[in-house]
Amino acid sequence: MVKHGYTPRRSAGLAAYENVLARAGLAPVAGIDEAGRGACAGPLVVAAVVLDQAAIRRIPQLADSKLLTPAAREAAYAHIVARALDWHVVTIPAGDIDGLGLHVCNVEGMRRAFAGLRSSPGYVLTDGFPVRGLGLPALAVWKGDQVTASVAAASIVAKVTRDRMMRELDERYPSYGFCRHKGYVTDEHMRALAEFGPCAEHRRSFRCVPRPRRVEGE
């Protein structure tokens, strides 16, 4: 809950938290979210997006990226990058995830995405868990991509950016079907791993990724 004497109203939809923070004098709000945390191949992508109330009203189809079709996500992405006050994306490769650990990379990615913003938001909302060291008041919101506009926008930017990267990786490693499952653990992906072994983009610290016999791309 935002502790500034106001309570987000459910009737306000995704803008409820941003409305509360604006009334408390803490607008604009930066939302931070990631894509690819649960995948066993490909990068982790983290986005920070800064929205004020006017920007939120100008962005249609703003929702948790997982609830949108690919076409709707692409459309929403175009509106967000055109109308947000600011946005920044960082990518963390599979090798860093293996070397440093997923959670460490996730938190550091959120810090880097925030640090890359050119504007100065008044408050930060993050999805799921707190991130220290941002230098601003911040709140971790459970399922933030489903209940706050700024985090939902960040989830869309991160997801669309990563999906585009995975389609490019599919051209380099056509054996795995990255364009379809985007590196997540599916039956198709596990069958390809069993047949071909991991490629250079697989996260070898993940238990579902077998030890390489022949590493494609290395």
Image (tube, grey):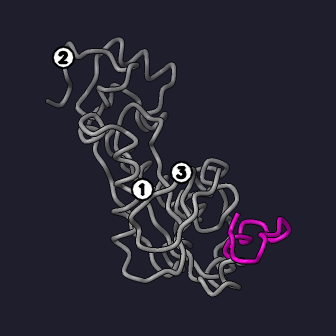
User: Residue 203 occupies which quadrant of the picture?
Assistant: top left
> How far is mark 3 from mark 1, CA to CA?
14 Å
Residue at image position (45%, 78%) is 86
**Callouts 1 and 2 close, C-beta under 8 Å:** no
How dense is the environment of label 2, judged by Cα within 10 Å: few (below 14), some, or many (20 and up)? Answer: few
Badge number at residue 214? 2
Residue at image position (37%, 61%) is 111
Task: State which tag comes first along the sequence, 3 or 1.
Answer: 1
How dense is the environment of label 1, judged by Cα within 10 Å: few (below 14), some, or many (20 and up)? Answer: many
Q: Which of marks 3 and 2 is in front?
A: 3
Report which residue position mark 1 lands on.
46
Residue at image position (80%, 71%) is 12
Q: Which residue reaches farthest right?
A: 11
Classify mark 1: helix, strand or loop: strand
Relative to residue 155, is residue 211 depicted above or below? above
Q: Which of marks 3 and 1 is in front?
A: 3
Q: Tell me, yes or no, whether the highlighted magenta stretch contains residue 68.
A: no
Query: Considering depth in this image, is 59 or 122 the residue closer to the camera?
Result: 122
Q: Give the range drawn in magenta.
A: 1-18
Residue at image position (52%, 72%) is 137
Q: Relative to residue 218, is residue 78 drawn left or right?
A: right
**Amino acid type shown at disc 2:** Arg
Q: Nearer the viewer, mark 1 or mark 2?
A: 1
**Callouts 3 and 1 close, C-beta under 8 Å:** no
Q: Relative to residue 58, is residue 172 drawn left or right?
A: left
**Amino acid type shown at disc 1:** Val
Classify mark 2: helix, strand or loop: loop
Q: Position of residue 60 (x, y in %)?
A: 68, 71
Query: Considering depth in this image, is 47 or 130 the residue closer to the camera?
Result: 130
Task: State which tag comes first along the sequence, 3 or 2.
Answer: 3
Report which residue position mark 3 lands on.
129
